Image: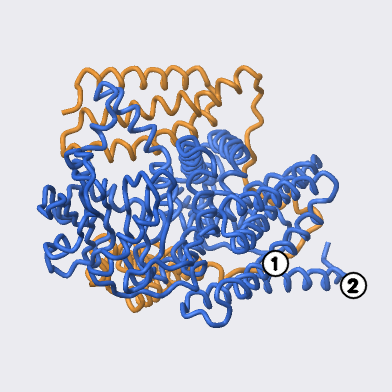
Amino acid sequence: MEDSSALLPALLIVVAAGAGSWLLRRSWQSRDRKTGFVPGGWLLLVAATILPAWALGPVRGPFIALALVSAAALVVVASNYTIRQAKARAARESLAPEPSDRATTKGRETLRWLLAGPIGMVAAMGVGIAYAALVPGAQQTRLVVGGLIVPVAWGACMAWTLADNRILRATAVLVGVALVSFTAAIMKGFA
Amino acid sequence: MTAPQPRKAAKKPKDLMSRIPAGFVRAVLRGHSSLGLAFAALIYLICLSGSLAVFAHEFQRWESATAPQVTEVAPAAVQTAFEGAIAKGGPGVEHVYITLPTADFPRLLLYVDADEDREFLADGAGRIVPGKDFAWTEFITRLHINLHLPRSWGGFLVGLIGVALLSSLISGILAHPRIFRDAFHLRLGGSKRLQEADLHNRFGVWALPFHIIISLTGAFLGLTTIIVGVLGMAMFNGDVDKVYALFIPAPPVDDPRPAPVLDLRPMYAKLPQDGGRLTYIFTEHPTEMGGAALFNVEQPDRMAGVDSYAFRRDATIYNEGKASDNNLGEDLLGGMGQVHFGWFGGGIVKIVYFLLGLGLTYLAASGVNIWLARRRDKGRPAPGWERAWAATVWGQPAGMAAAAVAGLVTGGAEIAIAAWLAVSLIFLALAIRLSADRVAWLGRLATGVLTLAAAATHLALRGGLTTADPMAWIVNLTLIAGGALLLLRRFGKGRRAAAPVAAVPA
């Protein structure tokens, strides 16, 4: 037997998500927090994400909805674009923050990228493996969740070490985390 | 007597994001910028190829448009095809993988792992038929999965890019305190930098769940080998097989004595009739006494995992697993590939994945555009980087379209890779001499022309107007529309550029 067709539920998801995004946009536009637009909008978005579980499968439904809700919301945002007039001194128009212009040396930059790369990877693997070793649960679950922790922890390490000006602190923390987590995992073992 | 103090207006409470200190924001923005610039080209390449790889089955159907459409196949026909593929597969057959027809891939496909690996298509009666040249699909999926590098290194590099993308999402959110407050602000026109920034941030925030899912699953899939390797070293005295054994049914007892080809029909007869759909048969040592077969049965609306039935040569079951009995880890692993590629909700989800994937590709491109525009606004333009980036952004789609043409003409994935590489290098070489605008202009032209050429080549060499598979028509029409749109936009821009410039308020 084939999977249930996603076409009609997808249409309902798109309509609900579009309506939810529109309500949120109305609230955002009017800046009036007393209306029911915000709870109504969020309610529709959440319903559009969760309710398909019944029609399309408990995991399949929400994952289909996640993709469609994003797309529907983007359509609402895109359909309400405004045209900005070109200004001669456009550079001063922006209030957006500028990246910091920190003083650095070649050695510090090398260490920074080592921390974001291999050292961060080792620390993240330590955390993932420690999770697999130390947390109770089915073996497969611990391994896969531990494996999923690795990219998240490594990504967080990258974001942190490339931003943090106190590079020695980052070094100490990452090396410490790697040592502690691997030691704890190896001592406990996998059972 | 002091004058009464004017009452201060009640301050609106700041939202959580606005409380992030400015110094922290600037530091994170610096990290976001460094990371994006370091990996932009690879993120762009992987996202673009991944967006196309969503349609891998549709491209396979397009490439094999002359092959018979198979919607149902009887066990006897599968057995005939199985024996035919082994006979044609040459010596040293170790495994045969049989992909059974489904709604989105109506083909009977057999992959023979022998001294020389080969792939075969069969018709509904099980006869081996020509038309299995999947050069373009092979090119685009391998480009996405391992960048055509040696598998483990390429996979690791792609996993690393997934981590970099995930990290960029984290730093991107932290570096833009107004990203949620401005979630509906889309202002086009004005300065290029501000327009790009608005598009970059709106795509970034509204498709965030999709971006997180794609980068996390992509990083996990790419890094699996190294994670399992380290896990094996730390926990299992270096024996990585013990890790895999937790997820894969135990292999059959080895008995290398020669034997007739495995008979799959009595195994078929033992499969339960529970509404599941047989999608895949994996046979091991099919011409040895120790031969075995693993049948994968998908249950409707179940995204993760399959029911599996492993048979010995005499059709007795030695391992049976029901997806409904899976634990969370097995479900997560079983659904990872489908979630990553969007292969779980039919055509509508594939189209949405493709569009959101293109959005992610744009995110990578616009990040660099913003950096280049910021430099230009500050009076420190980087024309060399502008040219190189234009060559990357437009050289890749042009190269992929060239690979499609080369793959269709020659049927060889190696030639497709060579065509892609050659076009990519030509664009980088052009960037030495030509301005960024000129490179982009040429890139759009080349992509449009080569996309139309791919459709024309397909019509000329792969079934033409007589092809029975409607997917071939859909793909060709999409290619023609896409190619024409690129060319029309190019000429449209040319006309606008030639017209007198309207007065713009200063």
Give the foreground label among 1 and 2: 1
Vertical comparison of B316 with B356: above or below: above
Q: Amino acid at mark 1?
A: Gly
Q: Is residue B302 left or right of residue B418?
A: left
- Tell me the colour scheme of the image: by chain
Query: Who comes first in sequence, dot 1 or dot 2?
Result: 1
Residue found at the very far bottom of the displayed protein: B466
Residue A180 rendering spot, x and y as whole percentages: 31, 18
The circle drawn on residue B448 is 1
Q: Secondary structure at mark 1?
A: helix
- Label 1 resides on the chain identified as B
Question: Toward the viewer: B334 or B491?
Answer: B334
Q: Is residue B449 left or right of residue B86?
A: right
- Label 2 resides on the chain identified as B
The circle drawn on residue A183 is none
Q: Is residue A168 left or right of residue B330?
A: right
Q: Is residue B220 visible?
A: yes
Q: Is residue B163 visible?
A: no
Vertical comparison of A2 with B96: above or below: below
Q: Quadrant of the N terminus of chain B?
A: top right
